[in-house]
Amino acid sequence: MASISDLVQKTLLAGYITVEAEEQLRKLLAAQYNNEDLNAFVTLQEAVMTGRVKQESRERLQRSSTEKRFASPSSCRYASIEQR
């Protein structure tokens, strides 16, 4: 398994972090890590907060939220039409 520093470096170069990479980071952070890894993780957090790195998980949440927003009103309209 790669180190946190390696994973962060790849993510920063890509400008994108997948759900799988996030899960791998969680596992690595649950184990022992060194100061270099901790500093790399902080750098990644800053990159995500400033928008230099996009997160697949956030994109999925936003998409899901948008789909629910558009699906709900149409469901209500169909229900009210059927009741007439």
Image (tube, helix red, strand yellow):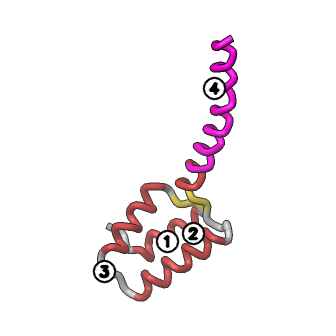
Extent of the magenta region = 61-84
In whole angstroms, how far apart are the C-alphas of marks 4 and 1?
43 Å
Residue 27 at what x, y percent from top left? 34, 67
In whole angstroms, how far apart are the C-alphas of marks 1 and 3?
16 Å
In whole angstroms, how far apart are the C-alphas of marks 4 and 2?
42 Å
In this figure, which residue is indicated by the disc labeled 4? 75
- Seen at 36% across and 69% down, the residue is 2
Query: Do callouts 1 and 3 mark residues in contact (Cβ within 8 Å)?
Result: no
**On screen, residue 82 above or below 63:** above
In this figure, which residue is indicated by the disc labeled 3? 32
10 Å crowding of disc 2: few (<14), some (14-19), many (20+): some
Query: Do callouts 4 and 3 mark residues in contact (Cβ within 8 Å)?
Result: no
Magenta stretch, main secondary structure, is helix
Q: Is residue 63 magenta?
A: yes
In this figure, which residue is indicated by the disc labeled 2? 12
Foreground label between 4 and 3: 4
Mark closer to the chain start, 1 or 3: 1
In whole angstroms, how far apart are the C-alphas of marks 4 and 3?
50 Å
Extreme front residue here?
84
In whole angstroms, how far apart are the C-alphas of marks 2 and 3?
22 Å
* Quadrant of the image occupied by residue 30: bottom left
Foreground label between 2 and 3: 3
Query: Do callouts 1 and 2 mark residues in contact (Cβ within 8 Å)?
Result: yes
